[in-house]
Image (spheres, rainbow, N blue to C red):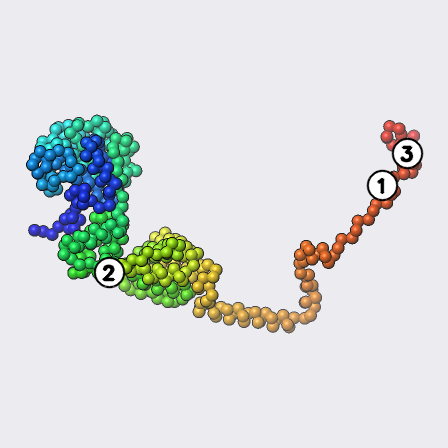
Amino acid sequence: MSYQVLARKWRPHDFESMVGQEHVVAALRHALDENRLHHAYLFTGTRGVGKTTLSRILAKCLNCTGEDGKGGVTSHPCGKCEACRAIDEGRFVDYIEIDAASNRSVEEMTTLLERAMYAPSNARYKVYMIDEVHMLTTHAFNAMLKTLEEPPEYVKFILATTDPQKVPVTVLSRCLQFNLRNMTPAAVASHMASIMQAEGLEAEPAALLMLAKGARGSMRDGLSLLDQAIAFAGGKVTLESVRSMLGVIGADVLVDLTCKVLQGDAQAALDIADAMGLQSFSYAQALRDWAALLHRVAIAQRVGQRNDENDPEAAGIEKLAGLMSPEEVQLDYQILLQARNDMAAAPDEYAGFTMAILRMLAFKPAGSLAGARVPVHEEPRKKDAAAKQEASSGLSSVLPAQSHLAQPARPAPRRPQQAAAADPLPPVAEPPAELIEPDLDALQEVAPWDDAGDLQRGE
């Protein structure tokens, strides 16, 4: 018998074996137990989280007849009746899986809906599973609206998509929608460990955790990476073999690089970057791993670090948390994020990575480890500046003395309190009495006025 990949061999066949989707499983179980069945379901989520698997399990629950052939709708399919075995083997006539990416026209959708009007041949329900439903054309969506809203009682629609934003709201309103979450690295690693034990193979927990992180929330991607790691290692899956396969830089290398940056040793930091290139490591992946390392350092500084014996980064994170200030961690983290955004515009990945290192060396918060140390390449500049200062002082001694007189020294500014104490203001003199009470008779002689207040003019 030919080899079957782990993602297909260990596909769940019932709700009990589903991993990481407890919220969806609980809702479907309650609906099946209480016979509150909807006519259309929509499963959304990223690739490899169990949309197709849930569709097949739901189809088995709807059509399971039990081992004795007298069972009904159940949340615990037996897996032994003809319907359950036929669905698992992909030969059940009344369970139809359609790929909307290749069957997206209105003509194909019309043909499907015409067939849906016929009763199932050998089942309780006829189940249509349309994968990647967002790829259907607008006319195809419009053609299925009426049937999707009021289908025959023996027809169930299960739609699956990785991009629900592209599904029309008229379709969303006719479906019971379930959002499948991304798998956590711990859940993926735990499932990998159980599979490796069942397969009789050995694997280091740290290696499985690294594979789980590389899966980025997808169980299928994680199992595909596990298949690749088994083939690459040729035996026991170790952390070193997984690092070599994925091209991932070890945490000790990034910790050493961060320490060189903290010390201000640009030459040593660039030497580490050159060594990474000789080992064919991806500089773009290195930026992501470095940012993830600083993220964990920031968390360790604020709330402490959890002790995990399977975590190879724990010792390095604890070391950096004691060496770096919180401000420096935040600044370097932002520099790495900016370097990731600039990587596409950089001349090459090496230039983008090394410029991130040089930015960290150029911008340092006050009081940082590298702030007190002057890099080696800046010492000649300091000597040149000192020589220029000595030359300028010698030149000023040669100038004649009149040049100093031409620029009088300015007094130093004083504070308002000092100015008030040094130069008190003179007292305000009393105004003379003549100004307060003017002599009206004298004014009349100088400028005679008439009774109306106008100046008398001579005729």
Query: What residue sits right under mark 1 in the picture?
Result: 436
Amino acid identity at mark 1: Ile
Side (left or right) of 286 relative to 448: left
Classify 176 as above or below 226: above
**Residue 346 shows in this picture:** no
Q: Distance between the residues labelled 1 and 2?
A: 103 Å
Disc 1 element = helix
Tag shown at residue 448? 3
Disc 2 residue crowd, few under 14, some 14–19, many 20+, Cα 10 Å: many
Q: How far apart are marks 3 and 2 (CA)?
A: 117 Å
Residue 126 spot, x, y in % from top left: 14, 32
For marks 1 and 2, the one nearer the N-term is 2
> Circle 3 — which element?
loop
Would residue 114 be found to the left or right of residue 331 on screen?
A: left
What residue sits 7% from the left and 35% below the top? 69
Q: Position of residue 329 (x, y in %)?
A: 40, 57
Name the quarter where the C terminus is drawn: top right
Where residue 278 sits: x, y (%)?
29, 64
Q: Which amino acid does label 2 sit on?
A: Leu
**Residue 355: percent from left, percent from top:** 39, 59
Tell me the tag on residue 239. 2
In which quarter of the view is residue 22 placed?
A: top left
Of labels 3 and 1, the one closer to you:
1
The residues bearing labels 3 and 1 have C-alpha atoms spaced at a distance of 21 Å
